[in-house]
Amino acid sequence: MALEHAILVALSEQAGTGYELARRLDRSTGYFWQATHQQIYRVLRRMDDAGWVSVEHIAQSTRPDKKVYTVTGTGAAELARWLTEQAPPAELRDELAVKIRGVTHGDRGAVLAEVERHRAHHAERLAAYQAIELRDYPERHALKGTRLHQFLVLRGGIAAEQSFVTWCDEVSTALRLETL
Amino acid sequence: MALEHAILVALSEQAGTGYELARRLDRSTGYFWQATHQQIYRVLRRMDDAGWVSVEHIAQSTRPDKKVYTVTGTGAAELARWLTEQAPPAELRDELAVKIRGVTHGDRGAVLAEVERHRAHHAERLAAYQAIELRDYPERHALKGTRLHQFLVLRGGIAAEQSFVTWCDEVSTALRLETL
DNA sequence: TCTTCCATGTAAATGGTTACATGATTTG
DNA sequence: CAAATCATGTAACCATTTACATGGAAGA
C-alpha cells in the first residue's frame, strides 16, 4: 500500500508530527494520494510497531505533547525495496460518469448543472496548480533531484485536471445540443 | 455511493443477472467505476432488501439457477433522486506518483522502468478505447439519448488515458535527462 | 485435456471515511 | 467573542479486495 510509503518519502525529507504530515501530504504527494489525519495516525503507529520509524516525544507546556517521527534504517530499506516493486496502474473513479450514463432516467438539467459544477471545481484546482508551477518552479528546465520529482508530480496533477476540464466542456456542449 | 446507482442504470437498460452485470459494467460505466462480481452480488442483495430491484428465479437444468434482476418503481425513483444530488469531484489515486516522488531514495532505474510499464499499459487502454470509438460510434455527431451518453463516458476514458500517456512520457524524458 | 464461460456465493482482511472527544492559543 | 490552528487520538462504520468454494458445459 502506498500511504505508508508516501509517509516514508515525506519523512525522509523532513521529520515531523502526524498532524504536520497530514498537511504536507496535501501539498505534495496529495495531488495523487490523499489521507486524513486519523488515517495517518493509525498508519504511523503501525509503522512504529514495524520499526520503520522512531518517535521522539516532545513535551510542550502550552500545547499537547508532540510526537516527532523519523525514518529508521529499516524504514529507508523498506522504501528502497518498495520502489523496485510493481504498482497497479491508476484507475479512475468518478461518480459524474455514472450520472452522465444515467441522464435519460432523471432530470437532465440537474445533471448538466452537476457537470458544470465539476467543471468549475477542476478549473479551480488547475489554476491553483498552475500558480504553484509558476511561483515555485521558475527554472523549470534546470530542475534536479527532489525538486524535479516534486515538479513532475505536480505536472501530472496539471495534466489530469486539464483533461477533466476539457471533458466536462465536451459533455456539457453535447448535452445542450441534444436538447435542441 | 455510486455502485448501487451504476447498477440501477445498467439494469434500467436491460434486466440481467449479477454475473452478467459484472461483465457489462466492465464495458460501459467501467471506465470510471469498477466492481468485482462479489461486490455486485452483495450490493444486489442490499438493493433487493431495499426494494429497488426485484428478482426472478430461473431454474436451469444444466447450469446453476439464475437470478434475473429488474428495477422496480422504487428503484427508478431512487435513481432519479440520486441524479439530482451532488457528487464529490473525482480525485486521483496513483501509486506511480508516490514512487516518482521517492526516486532519490531508491533505484532510479527501477522507477524509470515502472514509468514505462505504466506508459505501455495506458497506451494499450487508450488504443482499445479508440478502437471502440471507431467501431461503435461512426456517427459521432448524430448521437442521441443513451448512445450519446455512453459515448460521452467513453470520451472521458479516452481523455484520461491520453493524459496519463503524455505524463508518463514527460516523466521518463525528464528522469533520463537528469541522469546525464 | 485444459481453459474459459456460466452462475452463485461466503469469509476474512485491508483500507478509508465519518463522527466524536479534548483543550489551549493565536488570529480576525 | 468567534473561529481557526496545533496536536493528539478512539470507535464505528462502510467499501473494496482477495481468497476460497462449487460444478457442469462448451470450445480450443
Image (tube, coloured by chain):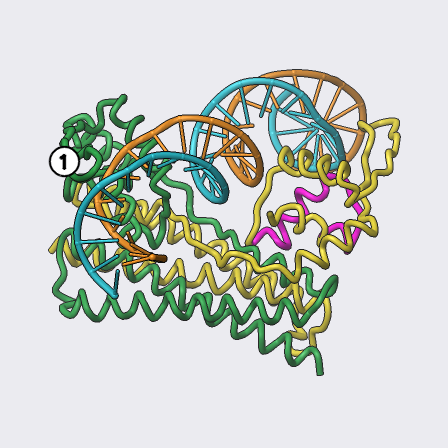
Chain colours: A yellow, B green, C orange, D cyan
Question: Which residues, given as a range, are shown in magenta?
Answer: A10-31
Placement of A89 over or under B69, stated as above or below: below
Residue ID for mark 1: B61
B2 with respect to A72 (left or right): left
Which residue is depicted at the point 52% across and 60% down? A157
Residue A46 x/y as whole percent: 71, 36
Q: Nearer the viewer, residue A128 or B71?
A: B71
Q: Nearer the viewer, residue A133 or A103?
A: A103
Placement of B65 over or under A178, stated as above or below: above
Residue type, label 1: Ser
Residue B150 x/y as whole percent: 22, 55
Asked which quadrant contains residue A76, the reply is bottom right
A139 with respect to B171 (left or right): right
A1 with respect to B52 (left or right): right
Is A138 magenta? The answer is no
Q: Mostly what secondary structure, the magenta segment? A: helix
Which residue is depicted at the point 70% across and 79% down? B179
